[in-house]
Structures are given as structure tokens and as C-alpha cells.
Amino acid sequence: MNNQLLRFTTAGSVDDGKSTLIGRLLYDSKSIFEDQLEAVEASSAKKGFDYVDLSMLTDGLKSEREQGITIDVAYRYFATPKRKFIIADTPGHIQYTRNMVTGASTANLALILIDARKGMVEQTYRHSFIASLLKIPHVIVCVNKMDLVNYDEAIFDKIVADYNAFSSKLEVFDIQFVPISALVGDNVVNRSENMDWYQGATLLHMLETVHIESDYNHIDSRFPVQSVIRPQSKEYHDFRGYAGRVAGGIFRPGEEVLVLPSGFTSKIKSIILGDDNLQEAFAPMSITMTLEDEIDISRGDIIAKPNNRPNTAQDVDMMLCWMSQRPLSLNSKFFIRHTTSDVKGVLKEIPYKLDINTLNRVEQVEQLTMNEIARVKIRTAQPLNFDSYRKNRITGSVILVDEGTNETVAAGMIV
């Protein structure tokens, strides 16, 4: 449990208080430097506020501070004695859907903020759906601004009931609720004296104790090779190791493994991390693996188990979030980056796109514009070795890169 890393993302409608909440978390957990706090106090006084505007701790762009909104994804790091945290503070506006997808793609948990005065709004549905689409395993719904509704228990209970009714249609199985006031600090780090009717944990306690060990797939063994290590020094003259990050499953010395796409098998000779030889390696460890046989292995190959291999296909079905300002049309070509491999691909079909507001499917689509999410079929020049995104978020995700500009134009979740 000690020093485990939890990545979480924040989502909610504009002015729901996401940045204030993160500022409050950092402030109350004593994770801010004095000069940062002094700068925020000075800015708050300059704006004529009679309180310290903690949202300024995360809104880094000048235009964000002027408008009081989040535009880009802001990453913040903090730690408590129990855990380390990386926060992705993502924007709430429709036109920044792609930023939310970027911030949420690696998250273990999503914090979804709801304004107690407004209840469930369009953005709540949209962000919850994106969290479900990205298979974020845990969701904490923070009912914020409880101080503005006189800490009314009935209002909190109604929002909980409404959200539970809606979330039954989503693929999110661990949902917790907490009534808070980010501005005053109720139930964020410290328990609220104003809501004695709430007997649950504070937000920080939930973040520190949520069980994330089982978020990684420890059944399907996958090791995408990032680089081949050949020191060619006197000490390690014949050393040949394969470095990368374990994407799933557990590997142990002596086990038989299969190398794709070649199909050759061998046994693991050793697993090395720094100067140590390990007895096992599992996701998300970065290791070097040596095999007993000399096999031609290069970057982009995947080491798996012979009796549990990934799917191999050239026609790949995926949900795609289009991120470029140029529209996407049929027969567009691009590079597909999947784990450590790059292949060329072409868009063959768009069965439907999602109306992100109503979650309805729109069929007979010829092109996608920025921030739209759609089901697509892509044909690749060489077969991809992949799992479904539901089974493994690493081997089930791709990014599309423009051939001409090298710009990342889309993120895809393989179905």
C-alpha cells in the first residue's frame, strides 16, 4: 500500500469547482510551497476577493485565470504518507472533449463534480459516459457547493439517486458519493462539522484507500518490446536483453513464452530490474528480460504465453475520439501507434458516431470533426497483436498519427 501511485482525473461542468477542489486538496494536505500560496493570495487580493482563490493553483494558462475556467489539461503531483497522486485537471467545455480523453486515458479513478444547486446536467452525463468508455475502474461523485444549499441532506440524497439510476446503463462498477464544499473545505481532507448526517469517509480518505491492485490485468501476459539491449562490453559480451514495460499478466524465469509476430517460442532465462534479478514481473513494471534461445526480436514485438495469445488481425474495430481540426473522412491514411509498434493504416468504415449529449447513435456518417467519438473500422498494412480495450487498456489502445505532419490526430479504444 505504501507509496503506491494513484492517477485520477477530474471532470464536471464549467464552474462546478474542479480547480478549487484540487487547490483545496493540495492546500489542506500541505502540498503547496509557501511562494505558490503567496502568489495566489496576492492574485486573489488583486481581484478583490475576500478569500484565497485556490483554483489559481491549477489554472496555469493566463486565459484560464482571466476567464476562471480550465482549457488545457493541468497535471499536478502530490503525496501523502499513504500514497502518491497524479491529478489530471481536465476542462469541462464540449469543445475540449479531446482534452478530457487525453487526461483520463491513464487514470485509475475519475472525480466527477456535481453542483448541488443544479444537480445532474448535460456535462455530468457526457463525462460519466467518457469515463465509462475509457474503462476507468473507479468513480467518486463529489456533490460540491453544499454550503450554498445549507448542507441539505435531501438534496444530496436526490443527486445520489439520480446518478445511480443513470449509471446503471454504464460500465462503471465502483461508484462512491461524497458531499463537499471545496471552497470551505467540508469533507475534502477534513471531516465536515456542518454535515453530521454524513457518516462516510472524506474525499482524501477515499483516494488513499481505493483498491487499485486489481485494475491491471494480471491474467493475460503481455510484454511489448521497447528496445533490444546489447552492451557489447567485455563484461557483458554476449548479453542480449529485451527492455520494456509489462502490459499485463505475470512473467517468471523458467516459463515458456511466445514471441509475436514470428511465432517462435523460448523460455525466460532471467528478469532484471536495475542490478537485481527478479523472481517475477507484473504490470506496470519496467524490466529487462533475457531468453534462453537466440531469437530475432525487435522493437514492436510482443512476448506473450503460448496458451494465451493476443488477437492478431489487420481489420480492427475501435471507438475513436477525433482530435484534429481537419475532419476525418473515409480512406484517410495514417500511422497507427500501438504499444511499441508503428504500422500504416487506412480508415475503411464509420458504422456510427455518438451524439455525446444524448448518447444516441448517428448512422450513415461520412466524416468526423474534432471532438467527435465514433465506432470505426481500420485496415492495417501489417497485422496488429492486440487485446480488447476492456481486457487491457495498454494493448487495447492506439493513437493515430498524421503521416505528413506527425501530429497525433486521434485516440482509439479497440472493441
Image (cartoon, helix red, strand yellow):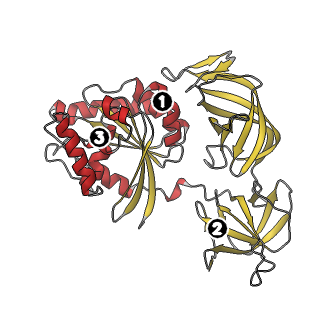
Nearer to me, 259 or 209: 259
- Foreground label between 1 and 2: 1
For marks 1 and 2 on the same chain, the one whose residue lies earlier in the sequence? 1
Nearer to me, 174 or 224: 224
Looking at the rendered structure, the secondary structure element under dot 3 is helix
**Could you give the CA–CA distance between mark 1 and mark 3, rounded to whole angstroms?**
19 Å
Residue under numbered circle 3: 55
How packed is label 2: few (under 14 Cα within 10 Å), some, or many (20 or more)?
many
For marks 1 and 3 on the same chain, the one whose residue lies earlier in the sequence? 3
Residue under numbered circle 1: 96
Number of callouts in the render?
3
Amino acid on which the number 1 mark rests in the picture: Tyr
Residue under numbered circle 2: 287
- Left or right placement of residue 301 versus residue 122 in this view: right
Residue 158 visible somewhere in the drawing: yes
Residue 264, x across and y down, in percent: 86, 62
Q: Quadrant of residue 152?
A: top left
Amino acid on which the number 3 mark rests in the picture: Ser
Residue 248, x across and y down, in percent: 64, 57
Amino acid on which the number 2 mark rests in the picture: Ile
Please tell me which residue is depicted at 47% across the width and 56% down the height of the picture: 212
Nearer to me, 310 or 46: 46
